[in-house]
Structures are given as C-alpha cells and as structure tokens.
C-alpha cells in the first residue's frame, strides 16, 4: 500500500522551499500497533515553521522528516496484540511527526477512540485540551474574573473565551476583521470585542480595563503583550501561549527599557508560559471534559470554512493561516 506524505526535505525559511511530497510503502505493523487512515489533519503553521527552520530544540529532524501533529481518522488494520481497538474505529491522534500523511502507524496506547472522525474532534484534541489546561494550570482562572484573549477567533482562542464565560468571567476578545467579530459574536461569550483593525488595543485597555485584568492570554506578543502587562490587576496573570509576531518576523525584537518586573512587582502579578506537553498526564481529564461539553451542545467548535483537500493542500492551508485569514481551526481533508 502506498502512502503519500508531506516531508521536510531541507531547512528553509518558507514551507514551499522546505518541503516535498513523497510516496512510500506502508510498513508491516508491529504487534501493538494500529494503522490509521487519516481523514482530517490540523494545521499548526507557526509550530511547523519553527520546525522546518530547524529552531525547535527538542526535535531532531532527520531528512526526509514527516511532520504534523494532530489527526483524526479510521483504523484500517491492527497488530496481533491489539486488544481495545478494532478495524473501523474512529480515532484522534496527537504525536509529533505523524499527521501530514495519508496513513500513519501508531501504538495502540497512543490513540483515543471518538464517535466520528470529524474536524470538531480534531479541534478539541489537542487545541481544546490546550485551552482547558492553560486556563486551569497556568492562568488559574477563577469565577467572575476579567480575562482578555488575543487571537480570540482562532482555533485556541474561540475555545478559551467559551470556557472563561462558563466561569461567569468578564471576557474581552481581540480579533482583526469583521468575519472574526461575527464568529466571536456567535459564541455569546465575549462581553467586549476589540477589532484591532478599527480600534487601538492599548487605548481601549488603558481606558476601559486599567489595572483590572486578572488573566491576560496572549499568543501574539510585542504590542499586545505590552498592553496586557501594563493593565494587569493586583495578582494578575499574563499567560504566554505563543509568540506569533516574533516568529513571523524571524527574530526577537531587541528592546531597551525596564525589566518586566518593574511593571508587576508592586502588584504581585506574574508572567507565565504554557506548553501543552508538560501537562500530558492531565490530557485525559481535559479531553473527557471537552468531549462531554461538545456532545451536550454546551461548547461550540468552530472550523474555518475554507476547504483544503489533499496532502498537497497542507502547504496552502499553512500559508492561509500564517496570513491571518483564519476563523476557527484550520484543517485539511484527506
């Protein structure tokens, strides 16, 4: 059986220069493995770009390197020692170096059974898992607090604002165009929406939320980080979940000014960072909560309406996401 894969063939600054498509034979399964035919894959363009630029320190990239992290699909074959999974089962998988291919071989203990291999379950695992764990463990969000979320209409952000509203929080969502505003409005979770193409983020926060932000959730950086930092409440927490602006420019901005503690020491506030894989033991708890919420219709899952199909379309989907056009989770159908 042939397997079409998108692989990193050399380090480069752009995805079209770094990657190629290749076909290989699907190898024989080991006794504890299953063969999954991927149905949808999730796009993590910023993470991918750091990988094909050779800048992720904990991943060894040997060319050609299959990449991509998350997928949903159907089991089409099982090893002789597999006991829980069956051919025809739908599964979600989250593992570095597995997703961007038609078929993947993975150990039975690394799959999670789901009712159907849909983009919604792909969004919940792992993006929704990240939202849940970041708010619980790093943001330590409490009921009735004020939270501000950058990139609120993205795959991660639109889950965060809903989970925050479930706690009765005052939720401020930041986005960049009318379509994203509409998505946030449809969630009924944001008390204030800031469209940064029409309003100045720092100006709004300085006027309306001066020193009252309990949790600031930032995946963008630079000017947004600065505005969040300035307006943290006493004991406020600024959670960094991404560095989109810095990564887009290819280098960290060099600044001259007071160190970060000058802004937060007297408030007892803090700056914290979230990395999903550091909370792996809590992934089942998060998945179970999110799946239950989704199945009961409590949690909305938004998938970007633009359709991408086939291994070849992963490159297009990545460029689309990097251009800031997405509303919800960007996925590719295989």
Image (cartoon, grey):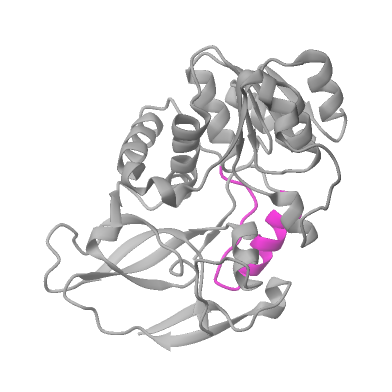
User: Does residue 108 show up magenta in the picture?
Assistant: no
The quadrant the N terminus occupies is bottom left
**Residue plotted at (39% across, 35% down):** 290
Question: Does the magenta-highlighted stretch encompass residue 304?
Answer: yes
- The answer to whether 163 appears left or right of 161 in the picture is left
Reply above or below: 160 against 311: above
23 vs 206: above or below: below
Q: Is residue 149 visible?
A: yes
Q: Residue at x 57, y 58 (%)?
A: 43
> Would residue 53 be found to the left or right of residue 33 on screen?
right
Segment tinted magenta in the rendering: 303-325
On the image, the x and y values in percent for residue 130 come to: 48, 42
Q: Residue at x 39, y 73 (%)?
A: 103
How far from the left and from the top, in percent, is residue 198?
88, 30
User: In the figure, residue 85 lies in which quadrant?
Assistant: bottom left
* Viewer-side residue, 166 vs 241: 241
Residue at 54% across / 19% down in the picture? 165
In x, y percent, where is residue 306? 65, 52
Q: Residue 300, can we see it?
A: no
Residue 273 screen position, x and y as percent: 57, 42
Q: Is residue 94 above or below residue 184?
A: below
């Amino acid at each position: 059986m042939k397997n079409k894969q998108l692989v990193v063939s050399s380090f480069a600054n752009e995805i079209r220069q770094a990657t190629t498509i290749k076909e290989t034979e699907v190898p024989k399964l080991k006794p504890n493995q299953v063969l999954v035919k991927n149905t949808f894959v999730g796009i993590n363009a910023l993470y991918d770009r750091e990988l094909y630029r050779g800048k992720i320190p904990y991943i060894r990239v040997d060319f050609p390197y299959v990449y991509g992290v998350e997928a949903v699909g159907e089991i089409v074959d099982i090893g002789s020692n597999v006991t829980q999974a069956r051919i025809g089962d739908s599964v979600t998988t989250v593992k570095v170096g597995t997703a961007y291919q038609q078929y993947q071989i993975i150990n039975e203990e690394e799959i999670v059974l789901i009712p159907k291999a849909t983009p919604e379950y792909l969004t919940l695992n792992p993006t929704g898992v990240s939202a849940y764990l970041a708010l619980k463990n790093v943001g330590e969000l409490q009921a009735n607090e004020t939270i501000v979320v950058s990139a609120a209409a993205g795959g991660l952000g639109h889950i965060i604002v809903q989970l925050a509203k479930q706690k009765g929080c005052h939720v401020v969502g930041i986005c960049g165009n009318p379509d994203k505003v509409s998505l946030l409005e449809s969630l009924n979770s944001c008390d204030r929406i800031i469209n940064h193409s029409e309003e100045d983020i720092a100006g709004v926060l300085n006027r309306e939320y001066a020193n009252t932000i309990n949790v600031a959730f930032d995946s963008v950086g630079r000017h947004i980080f600065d505005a969040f930092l300035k307006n943290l409440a006493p004991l406020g927490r600024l959670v960094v979940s991404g560095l989109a602006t810095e990564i887009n420019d290819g280098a960290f901005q060099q600044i001259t000014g007071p160190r970060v503690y000058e802004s937060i020491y007297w408030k007892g506030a803090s700056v914290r960072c979230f990395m999903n894989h550091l909370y792996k033991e809590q992934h089942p708890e998060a998945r179970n909560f999110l799946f239950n919420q989704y199945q009961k219709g409590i949690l909305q899952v938004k998938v970007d309406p633009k359709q991408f199909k086939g291994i070849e379309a992963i490159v297009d989907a990545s460029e689309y996401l990097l251009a800031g056009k997405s509303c919800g989770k960007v996925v590719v159908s295989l």
